[in-house]
């Protein structure tokens, strides 16, 4: 959710934060001690030995393999759906999709599975998973109050712990690409600790560098550190499946003396930008999309979050500019923003995508539930059962999400030449059987518990319903210790 709070900050509190930030490097190092809980993609296999004569690396699984006999939902209109289909993967790339493929490599039985692209979450405040399900039980725990109270006290290691837990949860649910909208980068150490979680867990996606909680609306964020992060983490390839973006503050929230240099700096670095806009009926919020258009800040590299309250003219401007919209139907309801405008956005032709937003508010990282809710909201507003089909909603959660993040040529569909981000869903579970209409089963019945296998960039990350290379007990224990310490502070 976007932080629409007053940008006032008590001077004594700011002083305390600055003192604590001096401990950032040590805190980040302490957080990194938990790295053994997740074997990093770069390290996996190196310490376990490899057998090139068999084309197999025990840390990654086979380098070349064929998923055989599954029901393939490719999300590529040229490839289509294939009952009893095969997917050939070599060195992390999809080589071919078809029936009866005669290919080298290991044969992996996918019978009884739906084989589909990994899910794409286009807006997720990963760090707030540290205080999962704590919001909305009292005024003190209202979402924004909770964010500020925890955010200003958060050490670099807290961002690491929250992001790592979220990324492991994402893997478990079938999310293979995520936009980490990291809106609490208090110091360079905070940025580094958050990115360390990505380095270890290894999902695909974007790291959107954001403004610290409680930061004055009259001050520009640390633009020099964004450039440093680009140079040290992304240009150097330390997080090879990720790219950098700006989690910005739009016109209507801050003045031109702030939004313009932040936007210009991001564009100067070639970075995509993302803004929470028109989330509520408040006068300032209602003017954001219009002002972004007037400032020539809408384009294919611009993502808008929520956008519940837009005019037809604003939606046309979004569509014509090539910008995208990420909605979070569950969080938008729970925070009381209103009803996600699924039908209006679909009718206007806007590139529409989905997200879970923040687990402090919604609790669950289950994108399958978000798809169900999205389908229901469209049909409910339309008052028409057939107003939208589930394949269209699956498109939002896969290929459209990839396109919105500039990754449409990389992931989002099972297309030869793309990277192998694949999810296999069990068809014969109590919760999914009998499977007659596969798209309906995926969007209306499936859940995280039915996800059997998750593959990211060709590497098996979950198999047989069990996460690989992750000590989940240690991840959970470390996160619980971190939130206890933060609350004690």
Image (cartoon, grey):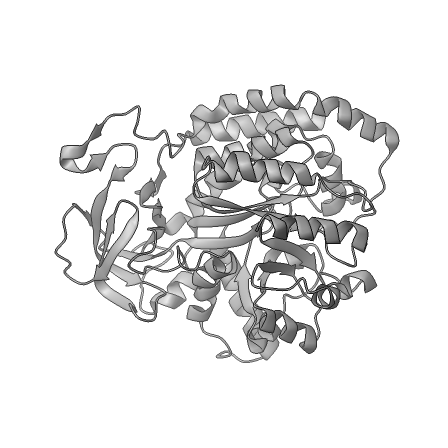
User: Is 173 drawn above or below residue 196 in the view shown?
Assistant: below
User: Is 364 drawn above or below residue 488 in the view shown?
Assistant: below
User: Is 149 drawn above or below residue 217 in the view shown?
Assistant: above
Q: Is residue 195 visible?
A: yes
Q: Residue at x 57, y 59 (%)?
A: 301
Q: Is residue 184 visible?
A: no
List x then y, in percent, for residue 162: 57, 35
Image quadrant of residue 446?
Answer: bottom left
Which sits in the foreground, 320 or 451? Answer: 320
Quarter of the figure that contains the C terminus: top right
Which sits in the foreground, 303 or 8? Answer: 303
Image quadrant of residue 277?
Answer: bottom right
The residue at the far front in this view is: 268
Q: Residue at x 83, y 29 (%)?
A: 13
Q: Is residue 170 left or right of residue 279?
A: left
List x then y, in percent, for residue 98: 21, 63
User: Is 226 drawn above or below residue 123 in the view shown?
Assistant: above
Which sits in the foreground, 296 or 47? Answer: 296
Image quadrant of residue 69?
Answer: bottom left
Q: Is residue 142 left or right of residue 356?
A: right
């Amino acid at each position: 959710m976007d932080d629409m709070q007053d940008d006032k900050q008590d001077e004594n509190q700011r002083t305390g934060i600055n003192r604590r930030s001096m401990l950032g490097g040590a805190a980040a190092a302490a957080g990194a001690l938990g790295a053994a809980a997740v074997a990093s993609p770069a390290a996996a296999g190196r310490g376990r030995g490899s057998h090139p004569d068999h084309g197999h690396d025990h840390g990654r699984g086979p380098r070349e393999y064929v998923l055989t006999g599954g029901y393939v939902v490719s999300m590529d209109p040229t490839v289509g759906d294939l009952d009893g289909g095969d997917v050939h993967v070599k060195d992390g790339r999809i080589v071919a999709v078809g029936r009866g493929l005669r290919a080298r490599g290991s044969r992996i039985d996918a019978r009884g599975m739906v084989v589909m692209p990994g899910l794409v979450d286009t807006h997720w405040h990963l760090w707030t998973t540290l205080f999962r399900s704590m919001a909305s039980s009292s005024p003190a725990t209202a979402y924004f109050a909770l964010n500020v109270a925890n955010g200003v006290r958060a050490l670099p290691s807290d961002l690491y712990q929250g992001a790592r837990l979220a990324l492991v949860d994402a893997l478990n649910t079938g999310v293979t690409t995520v936009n980490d909208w990291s809106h609490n980068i208090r110091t360079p150490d905070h940025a580094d600790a958050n990115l360390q979680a990505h380095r270890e867990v290894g999902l695909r996606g974007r790291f959107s560098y954001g403004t610290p909680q409680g930061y004055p609306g009259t001050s520009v964020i640390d633009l020099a550190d964004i450039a440093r992060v680009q140079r040290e983490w992304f240009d150097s390839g330390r997080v090879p499946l990720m790219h950098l973006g700006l989690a910005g503050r739009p016109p209507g929230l801050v003045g031109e003396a702030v939004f313009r240099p932040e936007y210009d700096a991001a564009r100067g670095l070639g970075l995509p930008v993302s803004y929470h806009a028109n989330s509520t009926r408040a006068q300032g919020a209602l003017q954001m999309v219009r002002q972004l258009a007037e400032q020539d800040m809408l384009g294919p590299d611009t993502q808008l979050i929520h956008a519940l309250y837009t005019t037809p003219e604003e939606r046309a401007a979004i569509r014509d500019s090539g910008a995208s919209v990420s909605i979070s139907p569950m969080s938008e309801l729970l925070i009381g923003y209103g009803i996600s405008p699924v039908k209006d956005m679909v009718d206007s032709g806007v590139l529409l995508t989905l997200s879970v937003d923040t687990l402090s508010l919604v609790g669950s990282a289950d994108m399958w539930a978000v798809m169900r809710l999205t389908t229901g909201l469209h049909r409910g507003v339309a008052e028409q059962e057939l107003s939208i089909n589930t394949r269209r909603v699956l498109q939002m959660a896969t290929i459209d999400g990839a396109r919105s993040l500039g990754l449409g040529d990389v992931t989002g569909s099972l297309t030869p030449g793309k990277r192998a981000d694949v999810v296999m869903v069990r068809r014969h579970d109590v919760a999914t059987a009998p499977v007659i209409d596969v798209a309906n089963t995926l969007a209306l019945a499936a859940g995280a518990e039915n996800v059997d296998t998750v593959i990211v960039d060709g590497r098996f990350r979950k198999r047989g319903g069990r996460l690989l290379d992750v000590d989940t007990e240690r991840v959970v224990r470390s996160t619980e210790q971190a939130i206890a310490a933060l609350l004690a502070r």
